[in-house]
Image (cartoon, helix red, strand yellow):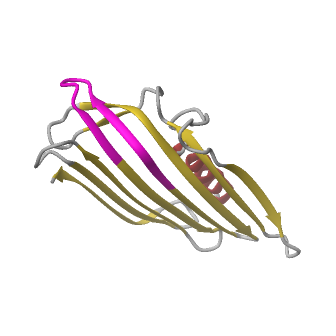
Amino acid sequence: MKTIITCGTIVLLLLSCQKSAVSPVQEHKPISSHALQKSTNGSFTINQQFDINLAGQGVIEFSSCNGDLLEVVSGVEHVDFHETVNQNHSSTGQHVNIQNLKLVSLTTGVEYTGSAVDNFSDNFDSTDRMILTESETIRLMTPGGKNNSVIKFDLHETVDPEGNVTGYVDNYRQGCQ
């Protein structure tokens, strides 16, 4: 059961960053690196960084101000992933930020600019518990007042070694500024 939870968590992490194909961006130098380090005590660390070009990938967002669907026409999603495994303990961290984000309303044609930041951490000890924490902020701006969309999401979840959720808090909020 513990191995299933660990494998499931790793798969979810890898799938969560698969928003589009990895491809270079002309105006932004792509970063792609991967490092695996193994220590003498049997622990190992994985560090990976890569950029994802969001242009032409069919990514859709929405405006929390008016509910319009917004198609992403350009942007670079930078992913910075770290994992350390040491005996029965695994620690994972992922930082994602999107820069040069440009979107167009599928209803009105209004252009938006934006940014997004997501931080995720997972600490798992097969003899104790697993703790998941995530915080995400998306900002979408367009000219004028009271029409800038802000979406924020926070999640904290604790799971015991038997797979029972022992603590769960989520806080989703959206609005206009």
Q: What residue is shown at x 62% (from left), y 47% (from top)?
A: 50
Q: Above or below — where is 52 with respect to 40?
A: above
Instruction: Report the residue at 61% width, 57% height from top.
Output: 81
- Give yes or no for residue 168 being in the magenta stretch: no
Q: Residue 27 location in percent, x, y?
A: 53, 39
Find the residue positioned furthest to the right. 40
Q: In this view, does 39 lie to the left or right of 124?
A: right
- Residue 9 seen from this side: yes
**Residue segment shown in magenta:** 96-114
Q: Position of residue 147 (x, y in %)?
A: 14, 45
Displayed quadrant of residue 35: bottom right
In the rendered image of this protein, does residue 120 appear above or below residue 65? below
Q: Can residue 18 be seen in this view?
A: no
Q: Which residue is drawn at 50% across and 37% down?
A: 19
Q: Which of 123 and 94 is in front in this view?
A: 94
Of residues 166 and 98, which is closer to you in this image? 98
How far from the left and from the top, in percent, is residue 51? 58, 45
Q: How many marks?
A: 0
Secondary structure mostly seen in magenta is: strand
- In what quadrant of the picture does the N terminus appear? bottom right
Residue 93 sits in quarter: bottom right
Name the residue at the front extreme.
27
- How far across and down, in percent of the image, does residue 130 sit? 55, 66
107 in the magenta segment? yes
**Which residue is at a point 17% across and 51% down the rendered structure image?**
175
Against 127, is 107 above or below? above
Q: The C terminus lies in which quarter of the figure?
A: bottom left
Between 38 and 85, the one lying in front of the other is 38
